[in-house]
């Protein structure tokens, strides 16, 4: 029985060493970023969001070391920058946590937190969330998963922040490089009650739910064959490898990316060394 309180990928979290430097890098790639957010003292982190519809990317950095952010710090120390976790949209985080508890897993949370938000008119509001995480050890392919209930969507999905010079519209796929694609896809499938599906090149996809982006588990060799000519230098040693983004205008994408752009088949790519450990692949598509 599918989880009733989880409705697909909400956002991808890219862990970075220097938050402000990473934000400037993504601005140079044609993304519109939110003002920097600062989380609670307990969390010790700050972020910038890159808003799409219905999902988004989050650049996350540790500002002060705390017990809560120890797994994130360990990820960067061991594996470098890159996609460290993926969030699902939660309808009700408390109910969702109980759903996975009923399946024999001990959830972390639910946890309520908020961060200040400067709105386009200059006023200060707050983005409020309630999240829960699957156990830290349950990280298929090295990517942790959690669920995020948005209490104040109007302070997160702000229209002015959803328009990008590079024409990015939404996440189509999250690619996770692993030596055991079938095993890790089956692991995720068990955690979220979804059925893995083998793809033609041997990769294995797991639908995240609804019309949201799929997870795709594949080997580094398979990743290289999907994006020939794109160097994988700088890719996180473990964790998410790439985000496939739907572009509304590939000509605008190529122009905005400038010298970082590499054409690879039908995609326009940014190699991981130029996107904080994450390969970005822009493709045409409906949205």
Image: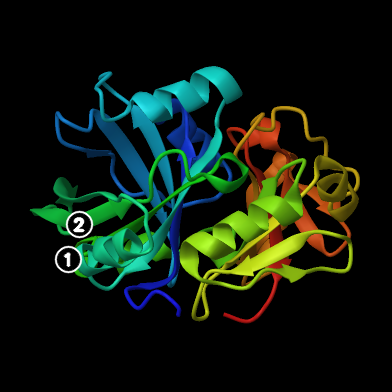
Tell me if residue 245 comes above or below residue 18 in the rendering: below
Camera-nearest residue between 181 and 261: 181
Asked where in the image residue 157 lies, by quadrant, the reply is: bottom left
**In the image, what residue occupies the spot 44% across and 36% down?**
23
Left or right, residue 88 beside residue 102: right
Q: CB of mark 2 within 8 Å of CB of mark 1?
A: yes
Q: Which residue is mark 2?
A: 130
Residue 41 % position (x, y): 14, 29
Left or right, residue 170 beside residue 55: right
Residue 19 % position (x, y): 40, 29
**In the image, what residue occupies the spot 58% across and 45% down?**
29
Disc ID at residue 93: none
Nearest to viewer (mark 2 / mark 1): 2
Asked where in the image residue 172 lies, by quadrant, the reply is: bottom right
Camera-nearest residue between 256 and 56: 56
Give the structural element (helix, strand or loop) at label 2. Answer: strand
- Look at the image and tell me in which quarter the C terminus lies: bottom right
- Look at the image and tell me in which quarter the N terminus lies: bottom left
Camera-nearest residue between 238 and 284: 238
Left or right, residue 275 beside residue 136: right
């Amino acid at each position: 029985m599918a989880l009733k309180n989880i409705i697909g990928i909400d956002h991808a979290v890219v862990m970075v060493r220097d938050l402000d430097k990473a934000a400037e890098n993504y601005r140079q790639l044609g993304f519109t970023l939110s003002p920097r957010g600062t989380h609670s003292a307990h969390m010790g982190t700050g972020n910038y969001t890159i808003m799409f519809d219905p999902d988004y990317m989050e650049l996350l950095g540790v500002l002060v070391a705390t017990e809560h952010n120890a797994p994130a710090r360990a990820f960067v120390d061991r594996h470098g920058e890159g996609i460290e976790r993926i969030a699902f949209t939660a309808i009700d985080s408390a109910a969702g946590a109980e759903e996975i508890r009923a399946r024999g897993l001990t959830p972390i949370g639910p946890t309520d937190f908020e961060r200040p938000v400067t709105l386009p008119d200059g006023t200060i509001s707050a983005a409020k969330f309630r999240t829960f995480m699957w156990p830290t050890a349950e990280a298929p392919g090295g990517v942790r998963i959690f669920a995020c209930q948005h209490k104040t969507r109007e302070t997160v999905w702000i229209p002015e922040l959803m328009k990008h010079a590079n024409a990015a519209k939404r996440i189509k796929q999250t690619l996770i490089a692993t030596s055991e694609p079938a095993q890790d896809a089956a692991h995720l499938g068990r955690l979220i009650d979804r059925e893995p599906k083998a793809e033609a090149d041997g990769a294995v996809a797991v639908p995240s739910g609804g019309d949201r982006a799929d997870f795709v588990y594949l080997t580094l060799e398979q990743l290289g064959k999907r994006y020939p000519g794109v160097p994988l230098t700088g890719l996180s040693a473990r964790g998410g490898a790439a985000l496939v983004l739907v572009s509304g205008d590939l000509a605008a994408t190529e122009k905005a990316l400038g010298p970082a752009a590499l054409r690879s088949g039908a995609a326009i790519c940014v190699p991981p060394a130029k996107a904080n450990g994450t390969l970005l692949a822009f493709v045409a598509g409906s949205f």
